[in-house]
């Protein structure tokens, strides 16, 4: 693809998004019938997927608790207390790699110790 076709596609995308935004905020959002249908659709979706949501929470309960605790202690600048108090949470966070590229010294596993190589003189 050349530069002109890429720019044309980007402009088409921006116009489409702007049109969708304007339709919702100037037309649909003000229409009580649309809002009632949307509420009904959302309620139906919630009721159909309530069990899936509960199952997903139960499956990831340890991770959710560990992440919540971690952010609490991080906000209060007490990560050293977190590490000492909840070593199992630290392991869960390392397993799930929740920091996504952020190098937190408390959650980075220690580097393996390289044995010193002894030179053998003949």
Image (cartoon, grey):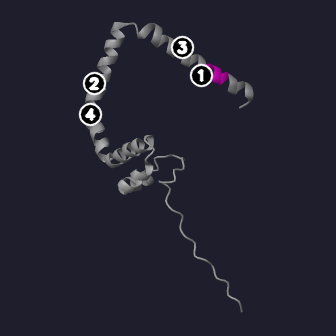
Location of residue 39 in the rendering, given as x and y in whole percent from the top left corner: 31, 18
Residue 73 appears at what percent x and percent y?
41, 44
Could you tell me which quadrant the N terminus lies in?
A: top right
Residue 41 or residue 111, whichever sits in front: 111
Q: Which mark is residue 117?
A: none
**Residue receiving disc 3:** 19
Using the image as rendered, state which of residue 88 and residue 14 is in the foreground: 88
Say whether disc 3 or disc 2 marks the residue closer to the N-terminus.
3
Q: How many marks?
A: 4
Q: Quadrant of residue 94?
A: bottom left
Q: Secondary structure at mark 4?
A: helix
Nearer-N-terminus badge (4/1): 1
Classed neighbour count for the residue bearing mark 4: other residues with Cα under 10 Å, few (<14), some (14–19), many (≥20)? few
Q: CA gap, disc 4 to disc 2?
A: 10 Å
Q: Is residue 6 above or below residue 55?
A: above
| N-term mark: 3 or 4 | 3
Residue linked to disc 2: 44
Residue drawn where x is 62% and y is 19% of the image: 12
**Which badge, 4 or 2, comes first in the chain's sequence?**
2
Residue 34: image x %, image y %? 36, 11
Magenta segment boundaries in residue numbering: 8-12
Secondary element at tag 2 = helix
Determine if the magenta segment contains residue 11: yes
The first of marks 1 and 2 along the sequence is 1
The residue pinned by badge 4 equals 50
| Residue at horizontal 36 percent and vertical 56 percent from the top | 88
């Amino acid at each position: 693809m050349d530069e002109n076709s890429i720019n044309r596609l980007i402009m088409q995308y921006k116009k489409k998004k702007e049109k969708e935004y304007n339709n919702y905020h100037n037309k649909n959002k003000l229409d009580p019938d649309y809002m009632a249908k949307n509420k009904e659709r959302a309620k139906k979706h919630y009721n159909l997927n309530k069990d899936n949501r509960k199952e997903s929470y139960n499956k990831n309960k340890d991770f959710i608790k560990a992440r919540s605790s971690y952010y609490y202690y991080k906000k209060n600048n007490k990560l050293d207390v977190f590490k000492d108090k909840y070593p199992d949470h630290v392991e869960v966070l390392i397993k799930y790699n929740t920091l996504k590229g952020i190098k937190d010294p408390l959650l980075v596993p220690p580097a393996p110790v390289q044995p010193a190589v002894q030179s053998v003189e003949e």
